[in-house]
């Protein structure tokens, strides 16, 4: 795992607000797009504070995707997300970084994602949509706690 110290000097209690969790999903790894995806965030000015190539198991995915357990697409989602390694990472930037990361990802359905977004530029499949990003500051803190407990406050 790559880990480095936060660049800011805020107290630990505020840092989670400036960090968000992403997954470059198995399709991104298979297609060799991880470098391009991470480069967009780095070029934007966000820092990678943790990153690891990791194959996700069903139990971890059930915690991560708790809100989706039992939905029609859930079994396909787990099969996809566990079929090979993904890159799990934590990005850091100014307040609201999670929201800007979501905008850079694009809409969930890549056929509807705007050109210029990651999903809009690289994908066509609803489930295989390349990237996950936390959808709120609270989700970011929860997800970082699942995947990088050593970074949790
Ligand atoms: P998000 O990743 O944009 O936050 P969510 O609604 O949280 O979207 O769904 C989680 C993931 O589940 C999506 O990124 C996608 O991979 C998959 N997914 C969501 N809805 C559908 C669907 O209707 N059909 C197929 N896959 C879906
Ligand atoms: Mg979501």
Image: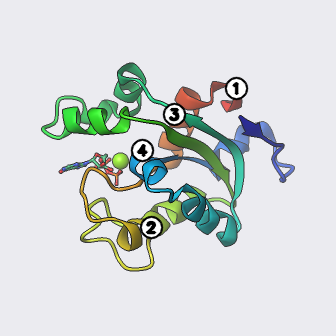
Q: In this view of the protein, can residue 135 be seen by the observer?
A: no
Label 4 packing within 10 angstroms: few (<14), some (14-19), many (20+): many
Instruction: Name which residue lies at 48% across and 30% down.
Output: 55
Residue linked to disc 1: 150
Q: Is residue 75 above or below residue 40?
A: above
Nearer to me, 104 or 129: 129
In three-dimensional space, the C-alpha distance between marks 1 and 2, rounded to whole angstroms, equals: 29 Å
In three-dimensional space, the C-alpha distance between marks 3 and 1, rounded to whole angstroms, equals: 13 Å
Q: Which mark is residue 142?
A: 3
Labels 1 & 4 near each other (Cβ < 8 A): no
Q: Is residue 58 above or below residue 16?
A: above
Residue linked to disc 4: 26
Q: Quick one: quadrant of the C terminus?
A: top right
Q: Quick one: quadrant of the N terminus?
A: top right
Q: Earlier in the sequence, mark 1 or mark 4?
A: 4
Q: Earlier in the sequence, mark 4 or mark 3?
A: 4
In three-dimensional space, the C-alpha distance between marks 4 and 3, rounded to whole angstroms, equals: 22 Å
- Taking 112 as reference, is 64 left or right? right
Residue linked to disc 2: 118
């Amino acid at each position: 795992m790559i880990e480095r110290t936060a660049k800011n000097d805020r107290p630990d209690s505020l840092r989670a607000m400036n960090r968000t969790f992403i997954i470059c999903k198995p399709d991104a790894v298979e297609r060799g797009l991880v470098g391009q995806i991470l480069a967009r965030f780095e070029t934007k000015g966000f820092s990678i504070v943790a990153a690891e190539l990791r194959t996700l198991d069903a139990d971890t995915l059930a915690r991560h995707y708790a809100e989706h357990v039992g939905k029609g697409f859930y079994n396909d989602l787990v099969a996809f997300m566990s079929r090979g390694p993904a890159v799990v990472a934590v990005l850091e930037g100014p307040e609201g970084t999670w929201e800007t990361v979501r905008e850079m990802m694009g809409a969930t359905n890549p056929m509807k994602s705007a050109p210029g977004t990651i999903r809009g530029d690289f994908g066509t499949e609803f489930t295989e949509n390349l990237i996950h990003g936390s959808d709120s500051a609270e989700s970011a803190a929860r997800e970082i706690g699942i995947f990088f407990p050593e970074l949790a406050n």
